[in-house]
Amino acid sequence: MKFFNLLKKEISELFTKQTIVSMVFTVALLIAMGQLVNSSMQKAIFSTDITIIDCDNTEFTGEIISKLSENGFNVNLVPSDTASDNISSEMKKIGADEAIIIPQGFTDTILKDKKPAAIKSVCTMKSTTSVSSTMSGAAVADASSAITKLVKEKLYADFGVLPEESEFANSAVEIESVTIAGDRTANASVEAISSVTMMRNMIVLMMIFILVLFASQMIITAIATEKIDKTLETLLSTPVSRMTIILSKMTAAALVSIINAVAYMIGFSGYMSGFSAGMSAEEVGNMVSSGGVDITEAIEALNFGFNAVDFVLIGLQMFVTILIALSISIILGALAKDAKSTQTLIMPIMIAIMLPFIITLLGGSPDEMSMPVNILISAIPFTHTFRAIDYIAFGNMTAYWLGLAYQIVFLAVCMALAVRIFTTDKIFTVSLNFSRKKQAHTPEN
Amino acid sequence: MSTVLEVKELSKKYPKAEKFAADKVSFSVDEGDIFALIGSNGAGKTTTIRMIATLLSPTSGDAVVDGNSILTAPAKVRECITYLPDEAGAYKTMTGYDYLKFMGGLFSDDAETIKKYIAKAEAICGLGDRLKDKIGSYSRGMIRKLLLARAVMTSPKLAILDEPTSGLDVINALEIRNMIKSLASQGMSFLISSHNMLEIEYVSTKIGIISGGKLLVTGSANELKERYNAENLEEVFERVVKSNEVL
């Protein structure tokens, strides 16, 4: 009986409104993430839609394509008389992200010259940060393999293959992987390129995530503790300007969180290298491509290798991001009434950083989101930090500068609010009491 | 004696509150005075003190500290006051010595001046070698002594102490009262608030009884006892509050 009495008290202390809100949010987030992953996986793995640009346009290629349809592929055939040199603009013209290009002379090379002919397996890369981009290109890869098999079967069935021709017949079709990013192309598979960019950029994403979380938690706790312990009253009554007090807190939190982030990144790099058996990102990419393709060259061709200016731009956005996180945290810390409310006040920041982080990681492209969801996600200032890496990688600088401009405006508003709270009565009169609704707190008289 | 603090019809109404927390409070504190604001919980003591300490802005009225208005020159006011909030804490990860050095550094950039502040605080708080220990290991009484020493080490024109002995045992409370009296005799002025009538009677030179945000009466302990024909301050307080007399 005494046990149950104690148990009841412990549960009532632990199972608070904050716990329920946090639990409901986590469940909702996990379900939403699951659906996002599901749609990406469905699209990446189970899609049978395939666009074929038939530049050869012969009876032979026509038969292969119709057999491809019989094998379960939903073929969108785009006949073309000439193989365009600019694959990127060709793909844009037909509005496809993935396609197989059968070049002119394909049939003659195989049937007349008895030589292997190449088809181009083309895939558009949309992100350098999302896990789903490593899985994209699955449909086009499957279709390419199917074409290889169908050509071999057709050669044996319809044209008769002499014993000395069997080696040629077994590998009559060669697959050349082409990856498109914006207006650039590279002769490597999207899977190989993504595996390299993912390994590189994941570190940056994690760094942003950890930096914001650490800095926010530190400053919320620091301000709330000062408020609760009443050391803040002592501090604010000294001949030091309030702005100096805010800036010192923000700088300290930023510095400590940078140290933390660097330390975590060192640990995280060690952890990740375990998964790649100690190989560098390039070595992993070369292994994945397995076609004698130099992945470093491919990445350079797509302009995915960051230069000094790119690093400055990413650093600038990270700096603004950390300032936003700190200014929001100052406001939230000022609302704290007790230690319990401090924990709850960290939640909005966690949600605001987790949501875009996970969406970016899972490949939630703004183009694929519904308008309200896109507006909601874009309204979160941290979203633009995560998206910035792709904006820079794909040369979408207008989007980068717009994102940064939005963040600067957001920062100015938050800073103005934080300074206003610190320079007026609000630092002592406003607090959030989670047992009731938001209320103006009247201090003890 | 010159006037260190002149409070002129100071009022404060919190947002959404129906009544004024402080309603046209006026009083003055001279050099060497220990002015005590006494009142029950929610009477308006802390609000009045916080306005004078420039932490809250008044709805109306003004207070002038050593010639500086809290409305027009709050930064100047902060240079000549120190404030010790009720139940205030200190930074637990710092040693007592580091805390005094840190707080001294907020009042002066000169290393020699800071050293003098620390030496004065060391002498006042009587914590000796314990100043080298982390504040987290201090008892409540030790923290209060440290904070009081911090509040007076800069020799402010006016030290504002909210419930300076609340929660302390008899010995510690007595030591702090004696400390305040000794510093006042050297010319430092104090504005203190308390619930403890016996303490106020012992330590203060002037008393203000506050209730419902209004300062009902001011005078020395003896003057008030005589005026209300009371044996002690508790009786004075009861009679003043009940009659709600405004002088």
Image (cartoon, coloured by chain):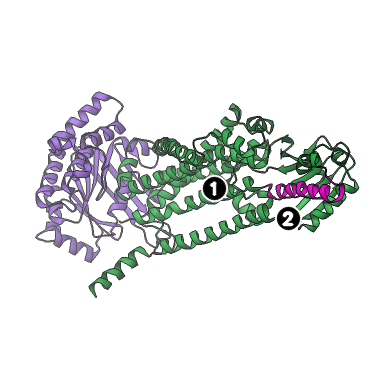
Chain colours: A green, B purple
| Mark 2 nearby-residue class (10 Å; few <14, some 14–19, many ≥20) | some
Q: Which residues are magenta?
A: A137-162
Tell me the residue at 33%/35% (across/down). Answer: A239
Most distant residue in the front direction: A163
**A95 over A10 or under it: above or below:** above
**Residue A142 on image: x %, y %:** 71, 50
Q: Mark 1 to mark 2: distance in Å?
A: 30 Å
Task: Give the total of numbered labels.
Answer: 2
Checking the image for residue A357, the label placed there is 1
Chain letter of the residue carrying label 1: A
Q: Which residue is mark 2?
A: A48
Type of the residue with mark 1: Phe
Say what secondary structure mark 2 lies in: loop
**Residue B239 on image: x %, y %:** 18, 64
Q: Is residue B16 left or right of residue B107?
A: right
Tell me the residue at 18%/48% (across/down). Answer: B140
Chain letter of the residue carrying label 2: A
Q: Is residue A335 left or right of residue B194?
A: right
